[in-house]
Image: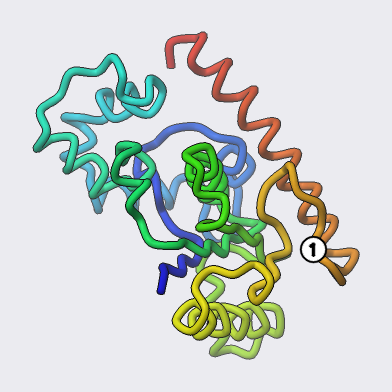
Amino acid sequence: CGVVMFYPALFVHPSPSPSRVIAIMDPLLPLGTLQMVVDAYAGRFLKKYGEDMRRVHEDKGAKVQLSAALRRRFHHLSPLLAPDELLKRLPACAVMASELDPLLDDSIMFVRRMRKLGREKDVMLKVASCLPHGWLNMYFIGDKSALDASKEGVCWMKQLLANGLAPAHLQPTFVDSSLSAAPHAGEDDVMVQELVIEALETLSVFEEAHAAGGG
């Protein structure tokens, strides 16, 4: 068994990242709307503890002194802030992110962190080409790309229940920057893979610059 995630919100914090910056004028989920959603969902909590969450994220929690109860609230709200010990115990995770989504970087950072913890065989990431956040809702209006991605997600669920997270069965288009395109990947899939690899590199530079500047 395992967990299938579709364009998940894994870091509920107004932290800048390349995908969020690019989405400032996104027609479906512009940055202003995203901020309104975050404020409605966790505005009071972030107003009180947002700076501590940012420090936990940037310092990986090593230098931030917080109570165990508060730390639990952090990773309940933002799984990306969960301690290594907890992430090592997670079931297999299959993440389908969206190419045109402000939350794309959340998925990339989550998968990258899981792989750094030695969970290479238990986590995978596929980026749905040319789809925005919320594309599951487009299934009902007949969008072919959303329909195809939805069908693939259903297949993931069935295969996870039957076989676990077996790349030979799931054949993700993109897993990590160190891997090449999946067999039989089309030109669009390869292009998306290249874009995500570039996003990974940009994200690393962005994080370093943001940390050096003190937030």
In the rendered view, tell whether residue 94 sits above or below residue 66: below
In the rendered view, tell whether residue 108 sits above or below residue 67: below
Q: Quadrant of the N terminus?
A: bottom left
Could you say which is closer to the camera, residue 130 or residue 125?
A: 125
Task: Give the image location of residue 6, x and y in percent.
Answer: 49, 67
Residue 157 visible in image: yes
Q: Is residue 175 left or right of residue 188?
A: left
Residue 102 visible in image: no
Name the amino acid type tagged 1. Answer: Ala
Could you say which is closer to the camera, residue 34 or residue 131?
A: 131
Q: How is the image coloured?
A: rainbow
Which residue is depicted at the point 67% across and 83% down? 148
Q: Is residue 24 left or right of residue 183?
A: left
Task: Give the image location of residue 11, x and y in percent.
Answer: 39, 43
Q: Quadrant of the C terminus?
A: top left
Which residue is depicted at the point 35% across and 55% down? 90
Q: Secondary structure at mark 1?
A: loop
Task: Give the image location of residue 209, x and y in percent.
Answer: 58, 15
In the rendered view, tell whether residue 133 sits above or below residue 112: below
Which residue is depicted at the point 56% across and 56% down? 121
Q: Residues within 10 Å of mark 1 (few under 14, many from 20)?
A: some
Query: Which picture quadrant has residue 54?
Result: top left
Q: Which residue is denoted by mark 1 in the rendering?
A: 182
Q: Is residue 119 left or right of residue 183?
A: left
In this view, which residue lies farthest toward the right? 187
Query: Which picture quadrant has residue 214?
Result: top left
